[in-house]
């Protein structure tokens, strides 16, 4: 697995996003521990990040007004993915977009760093 490639997910909400929930899971216990420390509330909401705000900002992820009401939210986890080489395993990022009308769509980004 080449973890140096760009990993960008375009999240689309034609009516405007109200929430973008992210749930990170992993079969690597050490990585799961890091995630639990960084994001005590998992899943977390990019629109209303609460205590995750500082860590999300440090990762360069869109939060608050960069999410709320937007028709397209760019979820660029390239720098985050590069770190997964130190945590061999299968990591999943479940993304749920809820628009201003309450309509939801979800998808899961799975990254296998077992052979990185």
Image (cartoon, helix red, strand yellow):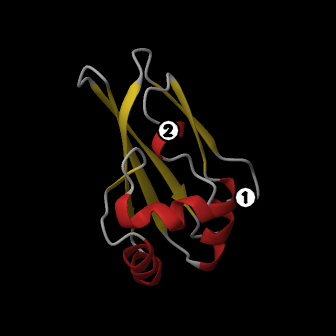
Q: Please state the horizontal and vertical placement of residue 66, each as a whole percent of the image.
A: 54, 38
* Residue name at image x 39 percent, y 69 percent: 39
Q: Please state the horizontal and vertical placement of residue 84, each as a whole percent of the image.
A: 60, 69
Q: Residues within 10 Å of mark 2 (few under 14, many from 20)?
A: few
The alpha-carbon separation of the residues under discs 1 and 2 comes to 33 Å
Task: Give the camera-side residue of 9 and 13.
Answer: 13
User: Viewer-nearest of labels 1 and 2?
Assistant: 2
Q: Please state the horizontal and vertical placement of residue 23, each as a whole percent of the image.
A: 35, 55
Q: Is residue 90 above or below residue 77?
A: below
Q: Please state the horizontal and vertical placement of residue 2, each as a whole percent of the image.
A: 73, 58
Identify the image quadrant of the C terminus: bottom right
Q: Is residue 11 above or below residue 77?
A: above
Total numbered labels: 2
Tag shown at residue 28: none
* Residue name at image x 33 percent, y 72 percent: 40
Q: Which residue is mark 2?
A: 65
Which residue is at the far front?
65
Pick whichever of labels 1 and 2 is earlier in the sequence: 1
Q: Which residue is mark 1?
A: 2
Q: Along the horizontal axis of the image, is 98 left or right of 16?
A: left
Task: Give the camera-side residue of 91 and 96.
Answer: 96
Task: Give the camera-side residue of 114 and 58.
Answer: 58
């Amino acid at each position: 697995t080449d973890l140096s490639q760009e990993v960008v997910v375009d999240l689309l909400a034609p009516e405007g996003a109200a929430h973008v929930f992210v749930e990170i899971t992993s079969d690597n216990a050490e990585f799961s521990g890091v995630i639990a420390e960084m994001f005590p509330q998992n899943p977390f909401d990019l629109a209303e990040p609460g205590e995750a705000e500082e860590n999300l900002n440090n990762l360069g992820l869109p939060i608050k007004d960069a999410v709320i009401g937007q028709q397209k939210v760019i979820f660029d986890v390239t720098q985050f993915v590069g770190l997964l080489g130190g945590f061999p395993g299968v990591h999943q990022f479940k993304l749920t977009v809820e628009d201003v009308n309450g309509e939801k769509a979800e998808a899961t980004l799975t990254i296998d760093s077992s052979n990185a």
